[in-house]
């Protein structure tokens, strides 16, 4: 049975009203369908992202793949060398055996600064042919790299006492300064423990086990006392490094998570890094990094860290930095500079995971800007600014025009639109580098400073407490600053711990890594 059709009204106004109602219902249905399609696309993208995070080639997985390829290459090289050695030398009178054709690396000279130990092979005392007397014609020297295993020793500091035969007064030289009062650890041992814990990410319990296997029992609690005492001893240098960083006209800022042991659970703290690096614009000031710890990520922490700073801050779009950019801030507003690497990363992920052509085109245009920036890295700020005004500014203007035009064709629910909005809403901060040659295109300097923390927390699992986080931040400031200045952290820490107790407070700046390096190099050159 077919349903009865409704009668069509004869009135023109009624027909118009029915037509308008039908058009309105159709538009609402199309809007619902469009919203549903956008939601379906959003869910598909989320699923693809989750699959990529779970099964895709992340940076860490890519690093593991690289390690596997290097291990495979190592295995092939070792197998070829073993086969070649098993064949042995060609015997006289026999045809040469087929050998694997391998391109062996060119042997470079061994490091010249290493000490040389001569081992002379005894020569013949007479001529093997006529038993005549031999005269030295020359010698052939073959150098082999060798290592001396770690050796432990006990240093006995002897202070002799003397008595005067006339007045019977007793004289004795004063006791030398010790790195730790009433401590039994020398500066080399303390530096080794600090650098291993915060530079090589070896917890104290693993170090204790290693030392025990070498016949030296050092309790974990004892080493923890030494770490705390060294942190307090080196606190003046940490303060000088922080003052040096905060005196820069431009700094990089970033943070990363730090697991912290809490009652019945593991809390999440934050480690903040502020880096001074004037090398990209040819600045003469040495690079340095200062770290701070906080139990959470509230905006009050960067406000406290940068309370006296009024320069340029290169960072991501973290909302906790917003108070720093306020015009009425004292001692003055901080100038925000955006990080193009953050903006590119969102678009790159969409181009890789969702195969979004608009995201891929945006990445291509941004990479063109990065290519020009690489060519001016290290030039003075004035030259960088001139090149940017001539070559980079048109590229940035074209990118903005293209982004705004492409954004107008996207749904507000699209993930590519959100990634584009991240840059367009902050375009003033992203384009600020066009007016100042000191500003970098990215915040990679701060991310590189935090890389050791990201790698290390997988080894030490968590910090013991908030105070432990503060100690870690202090020692990270020392070690990362030494690395930024191409100084061996362990050698520098050992020398500083040995000298700082008797060093004049007015000359502590002489112990900073960039001032310490030159005397060490001069001493090595003289030797």
Image (cartoon, rainbow, N blue to C red):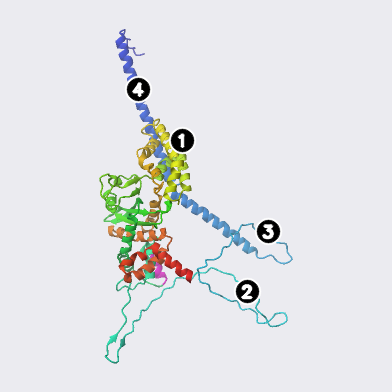
Cα–Cα span, label 1 and label 2: 68 Å
- Answer left or right for 132 relative to 493: right
Q: Where is residue 19 in the image (x, y as percent from the top left)?
A: 33, 15
**Residue named by callout 4:** 27
Local packing at callout 3 (Cα closer than 10 Å; few below 14, some 14-19, many 20+) is: few
Name which of mark 2 and mark 3 comes first in the sequence.
3
Q: Out of 321 and 4, give the one closest to the viewer.
A: 321
Q: Which numbered dot is residue 357? A: 1
Magenta-drawn stretch contains 89: no
Closest to the camera, between mark 1 and mark 4, is 1
Instruction: Report which quarter residue 85 is drawn in.
Output: bottom right
Question: Which residue extends farthest top?
Answer: 10
Instruction: Report which quarter residue 186 is drawn in.
Output: bottom left
Closest to the camera, between mark 4 and mark 2, is 2
Vertical side of 229 occupied by 455: above or below? above
Closest to the camera, between mark 4 and mark 3, is 4
Write down the region rendered in magenta: 206-214
Q: Which residue is drawn at 46% across and 42% down?
A: 367
Element type where label 1 sits in the image: helix
- Answer left or right for 169 relative to 277: left
């Amino acid at each position: 049975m077919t349903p009865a059709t409704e009668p069509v009204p004869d009135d023109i106004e009624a027909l118009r009203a029915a037509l308008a109602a039908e058009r309105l219902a159709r538009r609402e249905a199309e809007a619902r369908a469009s919203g549903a399609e956008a939601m379906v696309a959003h869910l598909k993208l989320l699923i693809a992202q989750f699959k990529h995070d779970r099964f895709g080639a992340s940076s860490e997985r890519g690093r593991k793949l690289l390690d596997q390829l290097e291990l495979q290459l190592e295995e092939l090289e070792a197998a070829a060398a073993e086969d070649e050695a098993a064949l042995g030398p060609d015997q006289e009178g026999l045809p040469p055996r087929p050998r694997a054709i391998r391109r062996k690396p060119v042997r470079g000279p061994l490091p010249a600064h290493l000490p040389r130990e001569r081992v002379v092979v005894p020569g013949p005392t007479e001529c093997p042919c006529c038993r005549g007397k031999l005269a030295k014609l020359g010698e052939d020297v073959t150098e082999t790299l060798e290592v001396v295993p770690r050796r432990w020793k006990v240093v006995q500091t002897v202070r002799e006492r003397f008595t005067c035969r006339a007045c019977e007064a007793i004289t004795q030289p004063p006791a030398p300064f010790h790195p730790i009062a009433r401590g039994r650890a020398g500066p080399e041992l303390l530096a080794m423990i600090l650098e291993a814990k915060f530079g090589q990410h070896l917890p104290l319990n693993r170090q204790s086990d290693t030392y025990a296997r070498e016949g030296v029992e050092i309790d974990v609690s004892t080493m923890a006392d030494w770490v705390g005492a060294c942190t307090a001893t080196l606190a003046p240098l940490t303060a000088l490094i922080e003052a040096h960083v905060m005196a820069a006209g431009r700094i990089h800022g970033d943070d990363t998570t730090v697991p912290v042991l809490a009652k019945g659970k593991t809390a999440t703290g934050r480690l903040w890094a502020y880096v001074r690096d004037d090398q990209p614009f040819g600045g003469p000031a040495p690079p340095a990094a200062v770290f701070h710890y906080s139990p959470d990520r509230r905006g009050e922490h960067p406000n406290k860290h940068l309370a006296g700073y009024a320069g340029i801050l290169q960072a991501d779009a973290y909302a906790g930095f917003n108070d720093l950019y306020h015009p009425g801030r004292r001692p003055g507003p901080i100038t925000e500079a955006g990080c193009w690497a953050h903006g590119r990363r969102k678009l790159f992920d969409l181009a890789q995971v969702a195969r979004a052509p608009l995201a891929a085109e945006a990445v291509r245009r941004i990479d063109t800007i990065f290519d020009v920036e690489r060519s001016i890295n290290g030039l003075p700020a004035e030259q960088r600014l001139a090149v940017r005004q001539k070559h980079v500014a048109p590229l940035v203007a074209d990118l903005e025009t293209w982004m705004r035009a492409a954004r107008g064709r996207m749904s507000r629910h699209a993930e590519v639109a959100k990634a584009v909005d991240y840059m367009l809403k902050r375009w003033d901060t992203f384009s600020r580098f066009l007016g100042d040659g000191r500003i970098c295109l990215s915040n990679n300097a701060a991310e590189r400073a935090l890389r050791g923390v990201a790698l290390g927390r997988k080894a030490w699992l968590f910090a013991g407490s908030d105070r432990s986080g503060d100690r870690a931040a202090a020692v990270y400031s020392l070690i990362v600053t030494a690395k930024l200045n191409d100084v061996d952290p362990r050698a520098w820490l050992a020398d500083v711990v040995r000298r700082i107790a008797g060093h004049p407070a007015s000359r502590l700046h002489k112990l900073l890594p960039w001032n310490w390096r030159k005397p060490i190099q001069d001493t090595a050159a003289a030797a």
